[in-house]
Image (tube, rainbow, N blue to C red):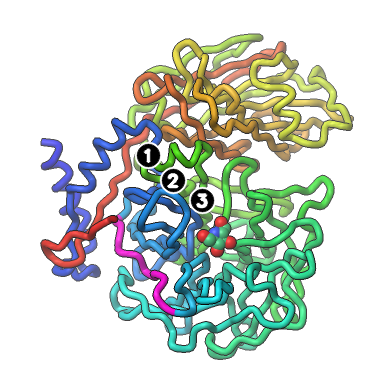
Amino acid sequence: MEICIIWAVCLCFLLVGDAVLEVDQVEASHHPYRNLQSLSREQPYRTAYHFQPPKNWMNDPNGPMYYKGVYHLFYQFNPYGALWGNISWAHSISYDLVDWVHLEPAINPSDPFDINGCWSGSTTFLPGGKPAILYTGIDLKNRQVQNLAVPKNVSDPLLREWVKSPHNPLLTPIDDIDPQNFRDPTTAWQGPDRVWRVIVGSKINGLGMAILYRSRDFVEWIRSENPLHSSTKTGMWECPDFYPVSVNNTNGEEKFSKHVLKASFHNQDHYILGNYVPMTDKFEVDTDFLDEGFDMRYDYGNFYASKTFYDSGKKRRILWAWVTESDGESDDIEKGWSGLQSIPRSVLLSGTRQQLIQWPIKEIEKLRTNKVSFHDKELNDGFIFEVSGITASQADVEVSFDLPNLDEAESLDPNWVDPQLLCSQKGASGRGRVGPFGLLVLASKDLTEQTAVFFLIFRRHDNYVVLMCSDQSRSSLREGLGKTIYGAFVSMDHRERKISLRSLIDHSIVESFGADGRSCITARVYPKLAIHSESRLYVFNNGTLSVRISSLNAWSMKRAQIFPMQKRRKQQINYK
Ligand code: DQQ
């Protein structure tokens, strides 16, 4: 019966794509899917609705894009093992960013300009809508160079075959550029003069920077005298990203838009906002990276090397990131895999125009099933109750809390400026006035294992300060795992009297969105007891002031469908 259902789904999938997919050449196979199902029983940490390849190592998302009705995700992949190495561009496609078909890698190391690895990069649509990949190749001499690849057949919506340019390498590390610190080209953009611009991450004389290049034909690139931006405080910038954003979904084509510059460093993705003048390529920043009091990050947990793309179909900007394992290398070898992609998030500028707002894409809600709801429930001091009736290891939880009178909140010591440290010092089980209150996820029945996602609220002058924490310190009875406690401040107006929390729980990942996506924290956890049906979900309040749940909605999440694809009939792709 189960097999029949799987085949029916496969068939529907292919029929839906029939009009565009040249179905005579591609065919889904149910065999590896069945293997994955049984794998998940043996492997409690494999996720059900986060993107993962069938096995092996994965890191950065590369050049996601929407082309002829199909979403493409490329990613850094080791075809031969569960640790980083042999890096190629793996390729998967989807119609909804939820269910995926794994294709053959788009680019493999093969030529003198990339023989030692095909590292991160981006896609750009050239005039006429033809996609192009710019990526970093590690050449024969182990230098980082920038290369171009284009589809062999642009009328194939799946873009299965890519051809490397005969002009490669297009950009080489000459003059003052360090050959080991020159990588990850962004999506290129055209100025009003029709000249292309692209930035590449680098570090020169200790300054992290985005080197700017210009080109008329996308092949010959000239380095601009000045970088787009640089910083003394960051070190090397990996995977820069630069894009317009606005309060509504219009790709910045709106009066009140800004530009986002993101750089990956210190294992975190930091961003700044500013005004970009395309004619002069001046980027005037509102605040700079790591400016005091302005440490703006997409996510204050485990979230790195992210990349956005503009979804022209739904007119929105979507963000993906690599979420690393926090177990050991030997665990990854034993599991046979390492690395997840975050749930794709839509990105908007906040109404205040001072930060970004992120929210899981709507499509993910199609996996919701088995809803459980509560309304108007008072959480008194020390109160904890279980949300039963859902699969707590694979769930989507949204809760909205009514706040008490904040005049009585603990006042914030002016020295408490580091949210992560504050979360570690306060903890979920410590007592406070307003909070800690929130969720205990992936918890065992006896609560010896629990990941606490919670808020603590302090008073400062006439305002208040909201702290959001994700405490992994008790997430597993196993030793030797990374159990860092994460923390972030949440920007709120003093008139607000409600705060929301959404957590996407998926076996070994918890992605949490505070105050409708103003602050986000992603964590990886590996519980020993709280797995599968032994996993539980609780709501708690350890503050002396009572907090009210105005509404709580929780759903079990269905498993996303993953289809490997045969290249030709009866010839199965061999995942080594
Ligand atoms: N990962 C890639 C690099 C990039 C780094 C190599 C970031 O291109 O700088 O796999 O995680």
Picture quadrant of ligand 1: bottom right
Which corner quadrant of the image does residue 40 belong to? top left
In the image, the segment drawn in magenta is 101-111
**Marks 3 and 1: in contact by CB < 8 Å?**
no
Q: Does residue 387 lie above or below 504 as drawn?
A: above
Name which residue type carries label 1: Lys
* SS under mark 2: strand
Q: Tell me if residue 400 comes above or below residue 341 in the rendering.
A: above
Q: Residue 475: horizontal and vertical position, in percent?
A: 53, 25
Residue 322 is tagged as 3
Q: Is the stretch drawn in magenta largely helix, strand or loop?
A: loop
Q: Is residue 173 left or right of residue 124?
A: right
Residue furthest toward the front? 141
The reply to whether residue 114 is in sight is yes
Q: Give the residue pinned by disc 1.
A: 335
Q: Amino acid at mark 2?
A: Ser
Pick the front one: 373 or 486: 486
Disc on res. 228: none
- At 64% from the left edge and 78% from the top edge, which residue is drawn? 173
Report the disc number at residue 338.
2
Above or below: residue 513 compared with residue 162: above
Q: Is label 3 within 8 A of ligand 1 (CB to nearest ligand atom)?
A: yes
Q: Position of residue 83 (x, y in %)?
A: 45, 50
Residue visible at 50% across and 36% down? Answer: 327
The answer to whether residue 249 is visible is no
Query: Callout 1: helix, strand or loop?
Result: helix
- Rounded to the nearest angstrom, the CA distance separating label 2 from label 3 is 10 Å
Instruction: Check if mark 2's residue and mark 1's residue have beta carbons within 8 Å.
Output: yes
- Indicate yes or no whether the magenta region holds residue 327: no
- The residue shown at (22%, 60%) is 573
